[in-house]
Image (cartoon, rainbow, N blue to C red):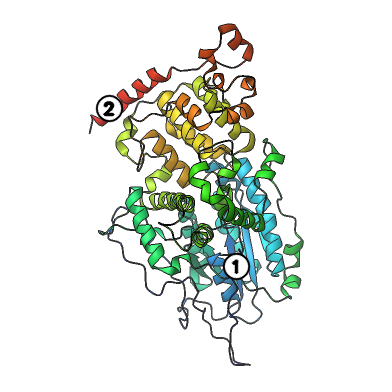
């Protein structure tokens, strides 16, 4: 996908520039509908995008000095709304330079259980981002905030050192990050010294726009998706890609020479298979766009058939890590899929429709995060399910973590995760359901473990997926529906291809033996495998879980 270029500006030669920002191609011509919902947690201080001929308010500095774009989980140059707006702002003042900022925040990362392999992916993409920005003569300043509360002073320091009068960033949706951004904004705007602008860029349709007829947030996916599709298909601006930023004047390299040549983190330590991870997830926008294009043009039409086959990398897009880091925008993905589907979303090719719907789930879980912020705080979406009496059986949890449960399909999924920081989506559902409904272990333990190990760990999707599996969330799997790991194994890995790769103890077994070796082999044969016996009886565990859930529901 080629960068979208901004139309050439026309103006009178010698005329002083007006202190305005031109209307962005992604700005809605009408304000977002007001919400009457009292339950959601949307900010009331949303900063609208400045439109043509709209001047800045009295707190705006009278002179545009330099402009700052603060990158967070949006490590891309293309289709980045805040970056484009910042670029346009930097063209207003004479000799104004656009400066980019990225802050490494180890304490914040630890507080959110960010996986080392995911941080490494961010750092590799940060290097690629700097190279792309350098082509535009845009310097990238990289700073470290050792403690979460230091972020405010770090941003202030960069603003002062770089002579910045305007700061731009794309909004984050999590409670802690929203509070952090409010503190930064208040500190910068104090006394009218700096103007801050925030943009909605995580979702195609901002959460405040997707509402029921009564103005409330959706808590069920199907009606949410119906409304989301209607908005996207009837209001073209939602899929408008932001223009690429304009380059700085060449003099920026002289003014900010130290930032073009400074050493920045190129990796982050982790103990996983580095070669395999770099093969699966190479860094950079170019790699991400090539993968997106190849998927929608060649493989997406079979997505609905192949997505549940765990041993086939080609069955999935393998784009989740790029979406999480913001190397790709979800808007770019839907635009590409829609174009391949003859400009259709809810009709057309079955595979493309199914993939777009999966992206709709991503949007849905972000809406839940914003509208019901308790899910950000280790709370169940359905409060009554917090009464479930979970087991705190540490040894069983460790067996699950290590892929030593005695259930081959479960162990294969966990070993894949522990080796490459990634797990096929079908396996995520199987291992999650097993932990919660077979072992009766709190879903939050599994949610945390996933976040600590996944290269694509995403708070909204990870939380939504775990609560679905545990029957505690929105659109949850009914509590009485419990995955049978044997049947899941036989259905989705019938020949044992995936199991043989990740559980080598079993690679010599036949296709029939490999799914349940402890039952089909003689005791001596099984003992020679060096593979553990099942740590739980599935039928007994299923009954126990259902009875416990019934007990809790009876307390309503």
Give the x, y percent position of residue 99: 64, 67
The image's mark for residue 436 is none
Quadrant where the C terminus sits is top left
Q: Which of these two is toward me, 464 or 238?
A: 238
Question: Dot 2 corresponds to which residue?
Answer: 550
Q: Which of these two is toward me, 63 or 7?
A: 7
The label nearer to you, 1 versus 2, is 2
Q: Residue at x 56, y 8 (%)?
A: 522
Asked if one can make out residue 165 in the rendered structure from this viewpoint, the answer is no
For residue 57, which quarter of the picture?
bottom left
Disc 1 and disc 2: Cα gap in Å? 55 Å
Asked if one can make out residue 112 in the rendered structure from this viewpoint, the answer is yes
Q: Determine whether 72 is above or below 438 in the image.
A: below
Determine whether, in the image, residue 116 is placed left or right of residue 22. Answer: right
For residue 411, which quarter of the picture?
top right
Count of picture labels: 2
The image's mark for residue 68 is 1
Give the x, y percent position of residue 465: 44, 40
Q: Residue at x 54, y 40 (%)?
A: 113
User: Which of pointers 1 and 2 lies earlier in the amino acid sequence?
Assistant: 1
Q: Residue at x 58, y 62 (%)?
A: 70
Q: Please tell me how crowded label 2 is: few (under 14), some (14-19), or many (20+) other residues with Cα within 10 Å.
A: some
Give the x, y percent position of residue 303: 51, 47
> Which type of secondary structure does the marked residue at label 2 adopt?
helix
Q: Which of these two is toward me, 84 or 186?
A: 84
Q: Residue at x 53, y 27 (%)?
A: 409
> Which type of secondary structure does the marked residue at label 1 adopt?
strand
Quadrant where the N terminus sits is bottom right
């Amino acid at each position: 996908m080629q960068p979208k270029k901004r139309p050439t500006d026309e103006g009178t030669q010698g005329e002083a520039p007006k202190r305005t920002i031109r209307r962005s191609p992604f700005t809605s011509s009408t304000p977002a509908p007001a919400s009457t919902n009292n339950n959601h947690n949307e900010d009331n201080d949303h900063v609208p995008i400045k439109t043509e001929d709209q001047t800045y308010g009295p707190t705006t500095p009278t002179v545009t000095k330099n402009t700052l774009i603060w990158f967070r989980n949006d490590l891309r140059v293309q289709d980045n709304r805040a970056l484009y707006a910042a670029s346009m702002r930097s063209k207003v003042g004479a000799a104004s330079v656009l400066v980019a900022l990225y802050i490494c925040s180890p304490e914040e990362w630890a507080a959110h259980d960010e996986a080392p392999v995911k941080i490494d992916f961010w750092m590799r993409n940060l290097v690629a981002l700097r190279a792309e920005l350098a082509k535009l003569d845009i310097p990238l300043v990289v700073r470290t905030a050792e403690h979460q509360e230091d972020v405010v002073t770090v941003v202030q320091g960069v603003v002062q050192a770089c002579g910045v009068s305007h700061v731009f960033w794309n909004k984050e949706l999590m409670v802690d990050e929203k509070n952090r951004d409010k503190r930064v904004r208040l500190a910068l705007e104090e006394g009218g010294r700096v103007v801050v602008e925030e943009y909605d860029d995580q979702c195609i349709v901002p959460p405040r726009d997707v509402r029921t007829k009564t103005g409330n947030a959706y808590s069920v996916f199907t009606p949410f998706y119906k409304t989301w599709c209607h908005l996207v298909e009837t209001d073209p601006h939602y899929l408008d890609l932001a223009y690429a930023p304009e380059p700085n004047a060449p003099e920026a390299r002289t003014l900010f020479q130290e930032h073009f040549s400074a050493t920045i983190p190129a990796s982050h330590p982790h103990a996983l298979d580095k070669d395999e991870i770099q093969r699966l997830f190479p860094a950079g926008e170019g790699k991400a766009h090539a993968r997106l294009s190849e998927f929608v043009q060649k493989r997406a039409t079979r997505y609905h058939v192949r997505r549940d086959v765990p041993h086939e990398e080609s069955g999935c897009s393998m784009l989740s890590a790029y979406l999480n880091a913001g190397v790709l925008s979800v808007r770019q993905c839907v635009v590409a899929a829609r174009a391949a589907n003859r400009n259709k979303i809810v009709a057309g090719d079955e595979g493309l429709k199914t993939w777009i719907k999966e992206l709709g789930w991503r949007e849905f879980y972000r809406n839940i995060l914003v509208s019901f912020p308790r899910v950000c705080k280790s709370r169940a979406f359905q409060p009554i399910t917090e009464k479930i009496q979970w087991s705190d059986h540490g040894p069983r949890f460790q067996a699950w973590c290590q892929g030593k449960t005695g259930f081959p399909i479960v162990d294969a999924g966990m070993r894949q995760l522990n080796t490459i920081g990634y797990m096929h989506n079908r396996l995520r559902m199987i291992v999650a359901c097993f932990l919660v409904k077979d072992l009766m272990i709190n879903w939050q333990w599994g949610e945390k473990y996933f976040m600590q190990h996944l290269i694509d760990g995403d708070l909204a999707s990870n939380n939504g997926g775990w609560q679905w599996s545990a029957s505690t969330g929105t659109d949850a799997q009914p509590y009485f529906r419990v995955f049978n790991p044997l049947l899941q194994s036989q259905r989705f890995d019938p020949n044992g291809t995936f199991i043989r790769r990740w559980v080598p103890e079993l690679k010599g077994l036949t296709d029939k033996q490999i799914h349940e070796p402890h039952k089909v082999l003689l005791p001596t044969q099984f003992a020679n495998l060096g593979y553990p016996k099942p740590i739980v009886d599935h039928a007994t565990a299923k009954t126990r879980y259902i009875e416990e859930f019934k007990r809790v529901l009876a307390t309503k």
